Amino acid sequence: MQKANRWIGRLAGVAAGLVVSVFLGVPAKADNSAAEATYKAKCALCHGPDGKGETATGKTMKVKDFTSEEVQKTSDADLTDAISKGKGKMPAYKTLTPEQVKGLLGYIRSFAKKS
Ligand code: HEC
């Protein structure tokens, strides 16, 4: 019995270690995947999962293609403003933290056509 308990204790220790290391490992590469998750949850409805805005809502609202030169040429400041303050029919996302907006901006930039 004693032996079994010790084993359980050791296993629990290993498991806790794994949980901690997985948890600590997340922020290292979270930047883009967190932004991607936010984008898919909040933005893809209108802007499309690929940023092209070819969704029903996106077409109705005539959103611009994020992969286009026009959007990619727009300054970081203007795109950031559009996200946090809204623009035309684009809703303002005031609850997003500056880091989240920055992440989303980076995600939008990643839609640029690879040339
Ligand atoms: C309800 C539909 C809708 C949702 C949801 C939405 N957008 Fe938009 N978005 C628009 C529309 C419409 C425009 C164009 C506004 C204009 O130019 O009048 C726009 C414009 C933008 C622009 C500026 C680019 C441009 O067209 O000049 C950015 C950047 C942007 N959206 C990012 C986002 C991000 C990031 C999210 C999620 C946090 C998001 N949008 C969610 C509808 C939406």
Image (cartoon, rainbow, N blue to C red):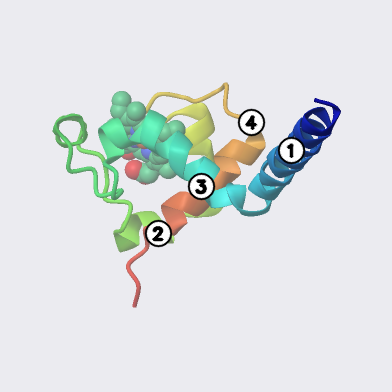
- Which residue is drawn at the image coordinates 51% and 47% (left, top)? 33
Q: Compared to 79, does 110 lie above or below?
A: below
- Which residue is drawn at the image coordinates 54% and 41% (left, top)? 34
The image quadrant of residue 42 is top left
Name the mark on residue 26: none
Judged by depth in the image, the label closer to the viewer, 2 or 3, is 3
Instruction: Choose the circle earlier in sequence order: 4 or 3.
Output: 3
- Which residue is drawn at the image coordinates 80% and 28% (left, top)? 5
- Amino acid type shown at disc 1: Leu
Judged by depth in the image, the label closer to the viewer, 4 or 2, is 4
Q: Tell whether label 3 touches label 2 (CB within 8 Å).
A: no
Name the mark on residue 72: 2
Would you say 65 lies left or right of 74 here?
A: left
Element class at badge 1? helix
Q: CA distance from mark 4 to mark 1?
A: 39 Å
Residue 82 position, x and y percent, is 46, 36
Number of residues whose C-alpha sits closer than 10 Å to that of mark 3, classed few (under 14), some (14–19) or many (20 or more): some
Judged by depth in the image, the label closer to the viewer, 2 or 1, is 1
Mark 4 Cβ and ligand 1 under 8 Å apart:
no
- Amino acid type shown at disc 4: Thr
- Amino acid type shown at disc 2: Gln
Name the mark on residue 11: 1
Name the mark on residue 97: 4
Judged by depth in the image, the label closer to the viewer, 4 or 3, is 3
Instruction: Choose the circle earlier in sequence order: 4 or 2.
Output: 2
Would you say 15 lies left or right of 46 here?
A: right
Q: CA distance from mark 4 to mark 3?
A: 16 Å
